[in-house]
Image (cartoon, helix red, strand yellow):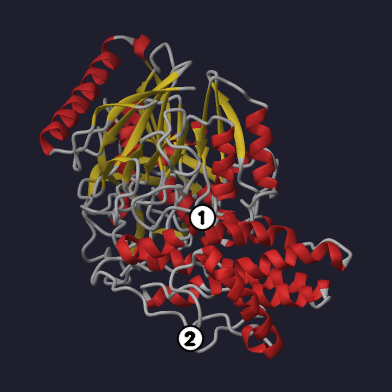
Amino acid sequence: MATDRNSNTGTRLGILVAVGLLLTVVLTATAATTTSSTASAATTTLTPVADSQVQEDAPTGNFGTTTTLRVDGSPVSIAYLKFDVRGLTVAPTKATLKVFVPTSTTTSINAGKVADSTWTETGLNWTNRPAVSPPSIPSPTPIAANSFVSYDVTTMVTGNGLVSFAIDTTSATSKSLPSRENATVANRPQLVIDSATTTTPPPGDPVIAASGDVACGTADATYNGGLGTADACHMKQTSDLVLAIAPQQVFALGDLQYNAGAAADFNVSYQNSWGRFKPITRPVVGNHEYGTSGAGGYFGYFGAAATPRQPGCVKACDGYYSFDVAGWHLAVINSECGRINGGVGCAVGSPQQKWLDADLAAHPTGCTAVLSHRPRWASNSFASPDIQPLVDVMAARGVDLFLAGHAHSYERFAPQNAAGQADPNGMTEIVVGTGGRDSQGFGTVVANSLVRKNKIFGVLKLTLHPVAYDYSFVPDPATPFADTGSGTCH
Amino acid sequence: MEDRRMTEPALPGRRRDASGGWGVIARRVTPVVVAATAAVLVGVLPAAGAPQAGGAPAAPPAAQPGSAPGIDPAVQKWFKDREGLQIDLNNALLPAQKLPRPLAAARPVCSRLLKAAGVLAALSRVPSTPLEAPVRAGLDTFVQAATTCLAGDLPQAEQLVAQGLAARTAVSEQIDEILDGD
């Protein structure tokens, strides 16, 4: 039975929580610099949030959308790269800029820092190019074809924020370097940051961070280089919250990459935000993932993590699976019922329904949770009746916690039975669609809805105890809100 | 403006009718089918408790102006009222994908489908004009599938079930986007 310890939606408490969060971050940073036992090395690989080239012979030309970046000594052509560094609590121990060079050369290719990062990918040209701060870092020579050149830019990356570099050469033979738009993802420019920002999870029960409805597409008008606007595209900010939580696992509750789950967007927008937790992420497929045929972008990006029951599947996969965490059993369902099993993927007798029943029956553990994209209950029209046969199974098998997204808001329900009636032995549904995309509102408040809040961004922090759980909504400081409590398994 | 269109390719073999619905199959429904469906619905609707059912769909209740359909209480109520019927339809469709043989074994499956699809098809109009066509996608085809089955053509009935499901899936993105207010 869930116990609500605090459901204040007021600004005052939200500010207190935000201050508390900041204090936590500060304390974490202090600990990281004074004792190595509380921190471990973390490596983050960033791809540019913008890149382009400027050409002396095309003073007003812009090349921001090209798939290669030309560097040349005559006429001069310079490549510009911009990265968005986030989540650092101390200066990185090492920062390495890596660019791929497809053709061999005996002349150095140089990297320099650009102090002004206000340039835009589609506005940069030779005339308005920002200055390069000396000295530049020369590459070793010769450079072999199809190799990465690495530059130690540690002194140029001093903290969070935008950082820009310029790449040039004195060679009169131009070189075309893959840009961030290049089809070969592995060859795009990279900024690799080694840091000591990942605190070791505290001893004891595992901590989880969960949310859905996360990353805007790079073509979204509010993408803004991955930083979003006041009311949209906060994926970077919410991923920073996850970083501060330092969870053991991340539950990504679907609609992870807007607008259509494209592989190219996953590899930039999601990768540069929540992709930092990819190795510990348990993904859930959402409706927007199916904007790409067979959710191929999603299944390709997450690979085996999304298809443990179907090794090697990268398109039109089932999308449901289960796993265990410290005595808890967790099942991930595919709530896009129309996308599997010929369009009735959740009906009574469907493969997914039979699998869920057998899976839960085989794991009569003390605590059980189900992760879904669509909720069964919501105080708007975003609830899904299609998943009712799965909810019937969940209720019959004693599921304790049901996490979902889809509605871009936060809503927590009292424990309910399959019919949506209050039941102290029922499941507690928590809708956490606040991962960054944007906000949606509420219509008529439905039965057993205890806490609701929209126009917020944030993640749900869960601590999984052997026979209970704690939950706490961790807000983006820009949208303060608190909901904290605990529940017991039955 | 943000481009929120999705890239799922259109399903082959179907085209929209003038109202935006998937009307290809519906136009093939014979008077016999219509009569059979009507006869079933007369017996079914009161028991199903379908609001404002029967004859032409009733005028929708007033929607709140200016709000996204997904947070409009009138739209929410409309979806809530049909939840049980939608669940029934899904559960009726699953066994209809591969009908048991012989016909005598298939009849209960098809009767169940005819009832479930027929009730939904006769429901009141959704109080959001853009949603009206997509929420009805496939329903006429399911009715035709059921009547085709009851007439003895099981392979054709299975094909119609698949077509109806594909039509329904094809508009699911559209429904989500309309609810989002896009």
Q: Chain of mark 1?
A: A
> Which residue is farthest left?
A12
Residue A464, placed above or below residue B111: above
Amino acid on which disc 2 is placed: Ser
Q: Quadrant of the N terminus of chain A?
A: top left
Rendering coords of residue B156 (x, y %)? 79, 76
Q: Hey, which quadrant is residue A120 in on the image? A: bottom left
Q: Hey, which quadrant is residue A329 in on the image? A: top right
Left or right of residue B119, residue B161 in this image: right
Amino acid on which disc 1 is placed: Glu
Rendering coords of residue A335 (x, y %)? 54, 50
- Residue named by callout 2: B19
Q: Residue at x 36, y 73 (%)?
A: B127
- Residue named by callout 1: A289
Q: Hey, which quadrant is residue A136 in on the image? A: top left
Q: Chain of mark 2?
A: B
**Of A65 and A379, which appears nearest the observer?**
A379
What secondary structure is marked by label 1?
Answer: helix
Q: Nearer the viewer, mark 2 or mark 1?
A: 2
